[in-house]
Image (spheres, rainbow, N blue to C red):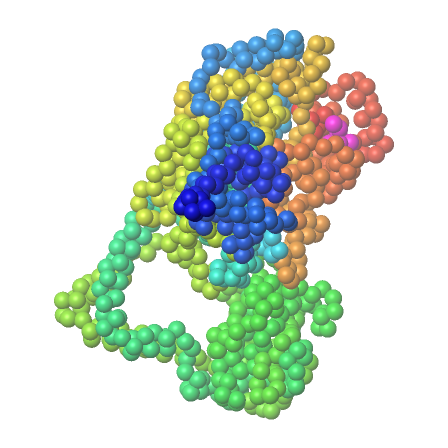
Amino acid sequence: MRFLALIPFCTVPALAVDFVREVRPIFEKHCYECHGAEKQKNDYRLDIKAVALKHVTPRKSAESQLFRFVSGLEKDTPMPPKSKLSSAEIETLKRWIDEGANWPDGVDVAKLEDKTDWWAFKPLSKPQGGAVDDFIRAKLQEKGLTPAPRANSRTLIRRLYFDLTGLPPTPSDLSDWSDLSDERYEKLVDHLLASPRYGERWARHWLDAVHYGETHGYDKDKPRMNAWPYRDYVIRALNNDKPYARFIEEQIAGDALYPGTVDGITALGFIAAGPWDYIGHAEVPETKLDGKIARHLDRDDMVQNAIGTVCSLTVQCAQCHYHKFDPISQEDYYSLHAVFAGIDRTEVDYYPDDASMQKFAALQKQKKQITDTITALEEPLKKKAGEAYTYLSKRIDGAAEKSANPNAKPDFGYHSAISPTQDAVKWVQVDLGKSVQVERIVLKPCYDDFGKIGGGFGFPVRFKIEVSDDPTFQTGVTLVWRKHDATFMNDFANPGLKPFESGTAGDDGVTGRFVRVTAVKLAPRRNDYIFALAEMEVYDSKTGPNLAAGRPVTSLDSIEAAPRWRKANLTDGIAPESRSEEDKLKLIRERDALMLAQADEATKTKLREARKKRDALPQLPAPQKVYAGAVHYGSGAFKGTHGIPRTIQVLKRGDVKQPAQEVSPGAVSTLGRLFDLPFQVSGDHEAARRAALAKWITDKNNALTWRSIVNRVWQHHFGRGLVETANDFGRMGAKPSHPELLDWLAVTFRDDMGGSLKKLHKLIVMSETYRRTSFPTRSGNEFENSFYAHQTRRKLDAEAIRDSILAVSGKLDLTIGGPSFQDFIIDKPQHSPHYEYHLHDPEDPKSHRRSIYRFIVRSQQQPFMTVLDCADPSMRVDKRNESLSPLQALAMMNNGLTVTMAKHFAAHAGSVRRAFQLALAREPTEEEITALEAYAKREGLENACRVILNLNEFSFVD
């Protein structure tokens, strides 16, 4: 026993945790459902070592995210969300990690897919082949298909006219080009590519892809009156055959890469082409949640437009997690956000020629230098002046002091009866004597010391202004829409003595004899509520006389206490004389003197000289404006960035309430490595970020850019792309039907043609493939014509049909560029404008221009164009729908435009035969002419023309 007592006790080391037997079963039981082969939430999976260990810190379980989630240490996001791990399972994982997280090689139950193993992510190389037809012929032989013969001259002429210009050939065009030898065919192609109609036609395709529109969309679909310069830029660039790389660079960073040019500014409309949340920007500050969401979505749209349109990548799918199919990380997506973090959608000044732009740019640069000099001299002096300077600044920013009575005469204005409640409705109106056009209305506030209110006494908190010919305002009422949201949908702050001005657009056509102001939320007084105004002024133009002067006034009720308060005071021309501007100038001089008192003589001299230089700078005429993506210098809710880019962070699950690590500007990093694409930001200005992205996209090595554009062009010539998913070249998109041809076109376009789109068009339309008939051969039984054994008979798009109707009617106005025509009337825009197309007169000559110049509304699209499959301007449309429906036939027969133009068509043609020739570019058969002339004799030539416009042959091209 004594011997046994001397034997020491020994501890046996615990066996190390076995991954396969102990750890993997835990993952299989609790985790694979969301993080396995079928699903990878947050782009994380636990069935593959390389991915799973990203969130494991060996020998440090407490620092390992995986352990913190499953053990409950992360209170906000406990994992798994449905079934919790047992304490034994948690202890097993803890031991496994603390022992080094040993995961043997070769035991993974799944294989990590290589997202870069896809045709679109391979570098470009030029395959062997000398022409388009070589590649098409080889594929037809492989598939056992026989190519169709060449189409006849009439078919080719009509096909080329519609493809390259979007307009039908006239009978004289057919006659001029009827002898269509190969040499003459080439001359016709050159002739059409040189036409200004070419740019108008192909601009429409580009504007579809970038979802261009001329209203904001969202809830308040307000008009963008200065969006059109971007549309004109696209037309001009295409007509001038601008190299494709520069075309893209100008649209993303033209202000940085091509300063001092018209195109460098107007092209930036590309960034702002899509929808914009007016409420989320103009009415909600960036500090609020809804404001953050609005600005996040705004940048998302900019990113999609740049990368989706030009590179055909769905980067937006990486907003909440790593892209499930393509090599795009969340960090990549938010790095692209950072590229656009310094800009908003705003109006930018420009001049219509490069010489003026260069003067403007030089002047702005000079002005900035002088301003920077003045600021550098003044800032130290302001600090030395201290609180006294700050106090004066606050007084300058405020209104006139209330202690000074600005009433020059005792006639204060109109005053309603007093109400015990604020929501009582009160109104006052002026009789102008006759119905007039109303363009501008000015309401001048009262001043009264009662209740220590002073300026703005009785000015309503919420109100609306209306115009009507009916004194009871029961019928024919038109709302004066400018600032309506600020005064009726929201509380309007006391304006002090600042006059309130509202009005209409000059072309709204708002007319009426009576102008009424209705207060729906009264101004507080002392324990009660009132409505008071000093003066109402009404104008029919910017410079005309006050039409309300001395006119009769009526109201729901009023206090008649002459001379201070009475209805007649509202139009007597007497209003408080605010001395705020005079006082402001006086305070500014006082503040300036205080600041200069802190300076020595040398500094004073420098300041005087700098200010003198600033004041001596020449003044240029008023610039034009374009709605574009640029730095916004605003105030209030929509302040913009003033050139200082916002901080961009990765958002967990795409939620603005869960910002994570900050990111720098960048692009898709994996593609940068695959294609050797540098992303280099040169300089601190926000535009340097966009310039870096523009150069990244247009780099010769960026295979996506060059494949994307040649595919889009091919698609519009054949009705289908070599890649059917023109907006998605990723792994969820289609594979190319002719990969060698796609790459051959891309390299040829990039290198041999220098990015000339006109040369690319010519290469394609000169091919035998393009010139084939649209009737399949007997062996051509491949229904979708994926291998181009024959041409595809295509339905004309909505714009080509509308333009053709105008053209054959002799009414088409070919004026190039300028503001868009409106084929609607804006009516009663209470919360957002109402675009009433049925009120438009089809005889209005302003609307007889080409459809590319139509004002495009997002929320209420043109019914006739929509029926004909016009693109939705709220979406990036890579390919139009081509539907056939009875509704289209009804529209072509009975729409106001076709009915009106049929009358002009009949007058222009003069006979059934001539009408047939104009519309269909051929002679009618004996059977056709007999039937149509009999119909015209019975129903009239005008109705026969409606029938001709409704023939399938008019709306299709072979």
Name the main secondary structure of what is drawn in magenta: helix
Q: Compared with residue 522, is residue 30 higher up or lower down, i.e. above or below?
A: above
Nearer the observer, 266 or 81: 81
Return the x and y of residue 518 as percentages of the image width and height: 64, 74
Return the x and y of residue 905 as percentages of the image width and height: 70, 34
Q: Residue extending furthest right?
A: 938
Q: Quadrant of residue 258?
A: top left
| Quadrant of the frame with the C terminus | top right
Residue range corresponding to the magenta coloring:
947-952
Return the x and y of residue 614 as percentages of the image width and height: 26, 60
Q: Which residue appears at 71% of the width and 64% of the height?
A: 476
Q: Is residue 949 shown in magenta?
A: yes
Q: Which residue appears at 66% of the width and 64% of the height?
A: 478
Lateral position of residue 159 relative to residue 756, left or right: right
Lateral position of residue 653 relative to residue 150, left or right: left
Q: Compared with residue 56, is residue 140 higher up or lower down, i.e. above or below?
A: above
Residue 853 seen: no
Q: Residue extending furthest front?
A: 1
Nearer the observer, 468 or 707: 707
Residue 525 seen: yes
Question: How many marks do you count on the picture?
Answer: 0
Q: Which residue appears at 52% of the width and 36% of the height?
A: 19
Lateral position of residue 695 relative to residue 407, left or right: left
Lateral position of residue 825 relative to residue 200, left or right: right
Return the x and y of residue 701 as percentages of the image width and height: 40, 27
Q: Is residue 29 shown in magenta?
A: no
Q: Which residue appears at 83% of the width and 29% of the height?
A: 935
